[in-house]
Amino acid sequence: MAEHECELFECGHRACGGCGPALAARLILKGTGENTIVVASTGCMEVFSTPYPETAWGVPWIHSLFENAAAVASGVEASLKKQGRDEHVVCICGDGATFDIGMLCISGAFERGHDITYICYDNEAYMNTGIQRSGATPYDADTTTSPAGKCSTGNKRPKKDLPAILAAHGASYIATASIAYPNDVVKKIERAVNTPGPNYIQIHAPCATGWGFEGAETMAIGRLAVETGLWVNYEMVNGEVEKAKKIVNRKPVEEYLMVQKRFRHLFRPERNVEEIAKIQAIADRSAAKFGIDVVLKKPE
Ligand SMILES: Cc1ncc(C[n+]2csc(CCOP(=O)(O)OP(=O)(O)O)c2C)c(N)n1
Ligand SMILES: [Mg+2]
């Protein structure tokens, strides 16, 4: 069967309704095609897609530890090269595995220059173990290890800039994407696996359970992240930003924050004007950095 005609990531798995990462997996395999070997770290996606003896994966799939997917992929790639084989080697890992515990192995794999594509599905916390914060958790998000309450407004640290860290490793192609823009995800994955060298893709993948919204809203929440500038879709080639998705009349961050329980404390018991302004400033800085704003005057 020709590539893209069948689903390489099958339905019938055990993800929550409206799971952003499950959609990411489907889109990733549409981009890689069937000539692919997946290395997956421990996390939600591993758990919901491979309950023994079943699997949702229509391509060879290896489960690594939480921390060493990039090292396992390095070995797979080296072995394939020695055998003269040409499968794409792709890591698909959560943000905890990527931003925190797997950093050492990722750094080593990128520094050694393995021909792998490392993909992080970014649901912005350790969801599988009960919504603990990670280095990808955004400022002020309520998680079980950054609880909002009388003394705290949630996660106090900014989201780590992992694309910049991997650009500093000399990665040839880096892109951010969102499941709310499916064709863009597929195109970027295709480009990454067909670009030699270690490449990195980070996919924004909203989590209904961890962020606190109805499963039917996943796409709308994903779009709001982009439309407010809190998530920017861009591509970097050899360390330089080549393209960033422009946003016409960027929306205020409230529109994204107020529809998720993880930010509910910013609106109750009363609006926390100061904290919302800090989050607006994060979006404004990033919009200016990537030059995404297009301001059109509304007709009088
Ligand atoms: C060394 C080690 N520490 C902790 C764990 C427990 N653990 C399993 S999955 C996970 C969180 C995964 O988070 P992330 O990578 O963001 O994936 P998600 O579950 O959000 O999809 C943790 C802490 C483990 N398996 N191994
Ligand atoms: Mg996660």
Image (tube, rainbow, N blue to C red):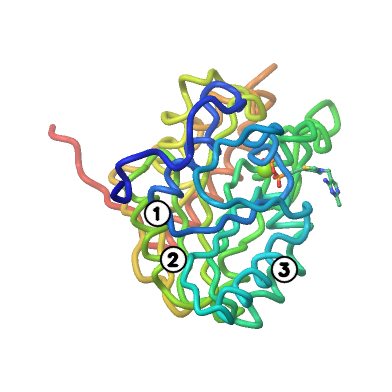
Q: CA distance from mark 2 to mark 1?
A: 10 Å
Question: The residue tagged with tag 2: helix, strand or loop?
Answer: helix
Q: Residue at x 39, y 69 (%)?
A: 194
Residue tagged 3: 71
Q: Residue 277, percent across and down?
A: 57, 41
Cβ–Cβ under 8 Å for marks 3 and 2: no
Kindly identify the amino acid type of the residue bearing the numbered disc 2: Val
Q: Residue 192, percent across and down?
A: 43, 66
Few, some or many C-alpha atoms within 10 Å of disc 2 (few <14, some 14-19, many ≥20)?
many
Beta carbon of the mark 3 residue lies under 8 A of ligand 1 = no
* Looking at the image, residue 253 lies above or below residue 243: above
Q: Residue at x 31, y 53 (%)?
A: 246
Residue tagged 2: 193
Q: Residue 58, percent across and down?
A: 50, 43
Q: Earlier in the sequence, mark 3 or mark 2?
A: 3
Q: Earlier in the sequence, mark 2 or mark 1?
A: 1
Question: The residue tagged with tag 3: helix, strand or loop?
Answer: helix
Which mark is on residue 33?
A: 1
Q: Nearer the viewer, residue 30 or 288?
A: 30
Kindly identify the amino acid type of the residue bearing the numbered disc 1: Gly
